[in-house]
Amino acid sequence: MTEPERESMEVDILYVGAGPATLASAYHLMKQVEAHNEACEKTGEAPIEPPTILVIEKAAGIGDHQLSGAVMNPRAMKELMPDFVEQGFPTEYVVEKDYFWLFTRKGTIKSPITPPMFKKRGYHVISLSNVVKWLGEKCEEVGIEIYPGFAGAEILTEGDRVVGVRTGDMGIGRDGKPKTNYQPGMDIIAKCTILGEGVRGSMTKQLIDRFEMHGQNPDTYETGIKEIWRVKPEKHQPGRVVHGSMFPDFFGQINGMWLYDMKDNLVSFGYVTPLSSENPNN
Ligand SMILES: Cc1cc2nc3c(=O)[nH]c(=O)nc-3n(C[C@H](O)[C@H](O)[C@H](O)COP(=O)(O)OP(=O)(O)OC[C@H]3O[C@@H](n4cnc5c(N)ncnc54)[C@H](O)[C@@H]3O)c2cc1C
């Protein structure tokens, strides 16, 4: 197939992936420029033009790929946006009670002491999807553009310099051939390209391979399950967070469970264990 004609656009800063990391970064950058320009009014220095910032997101809607509920330390949000609560941050509950339980084969030991790493009072129980949707709105309010439905497919380079990203072609059939609605991906040229694809990002991998950036800390993997149950109202305990560890070996291997209550009588719980875990039934 001959190389199709592609549209291209230029921006100052391009973020790939609309997760909490990139949206917070883009918002912070715009606020820094705003603060600088406000200071210029007092000092008489010339203000700078706000940069054009674009965030591309492969999900059809912002927040659609964030599956995580979370018990979030609000410190970073306070630093990013001191009045985040007043601005409508989508907190489900603020944690009031934190527990640590040890599960044995036959029962549960409810620890009278909660170890420091599991102390979560004052943390915010959130749906990350809702937080990302909300952060996206805040970004748009300060002039950041977000394009959902655009997946970065290829890093564009000039020599050893990253100059942007090519988005994926649309309308390709399962046989790999273009369909009638075929639309070639677009080249987005940027002065600065920031990859925020989350874990196992496909373009991040391209970049790591190409520039030999395999570091001292390779990825590590665990196995986990998570379920969300709707419970009877009398079983629902807003503001409760439980962490725990399970048999057969509480301390010899790092495994753990969580449980916390969300709105609408929902309870999120799950368990994570290393791939090297032994079968507890052995
Ligand atoms: C089940 C579960 C429970 C968790 N619980 C907690 C918790 O309690 N507390 C806590 O702090 N953290 C928790 N986490 C971790 C937390 O979700 C992540 O640390 C966080 O989402 C990472 O943010 P990020 O912005 O780096 O990436 P992500 O949130 O992964 O965002 C990356 C975005 O980039 C998009 N993207 C990827 N590749 C491309 C591409 N090529 N082009 C365009 N877009 C792309 C993705 O669609 C996604 O929207 C949990 C995670 C899971 C899965």
Image: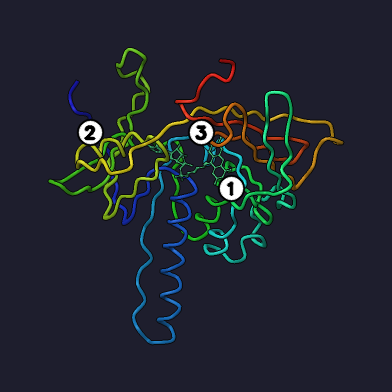
Q: Position of residue 10 (x, y in %)?
A: 29, 51
> Is ligand 1 less than 8 Å from the beta carbon at label 2?
no
Instruction: Name the kind of residue labelled 1 in the image.
Output: Val
Q: Secondary structure at mark 1?
A: helix
Mark carried by residue 5: 2
Q: Spot the residue most to the top.
A: 175
Mark 3 packing: few (<14 Cα in 10 Å), some, or many (20+)?
some
Instruction: Name the kind of residue labelled 3 in the image.
Output: Gln
Mark carried by residue 147: none
Mark 3 or 2, which is nearer the eye?
3
Mark-to-mark CA distance, 1 and 2 = 38 Å
Mark-to-mark CA distance, 3 and 2 = 54 Å
Instruction: List the residue tagged with mark 1.
Output: 131
Label 1 vs 2, first from the N-terminus:
2
Residue at horizontal 36%, vertical 62%?
51
Instruction: Name the kind of residue labelled 2 in the image.
Output: Glu
Q: Spot the residue most to the left.
A: 159
- Residue 16 horizontal side relative to residue 260, left or right: left
Residue at horizontal 22%, vertical 47%?
162
Q: Position of residue 122 (x, y in %)?
A: 68, 57
Quadrant (top left, top right, bottom left, bottom right) of the N terminus: top left
Mark 3 or 1, which is nearer the eye?
3
Number of numbered discs overlaid on the protein picture: 3
Q: Nearer the viewer, residue 157 or 146?
A: 157
Instruction: List the residue tagged with mark 3.
Output: 253
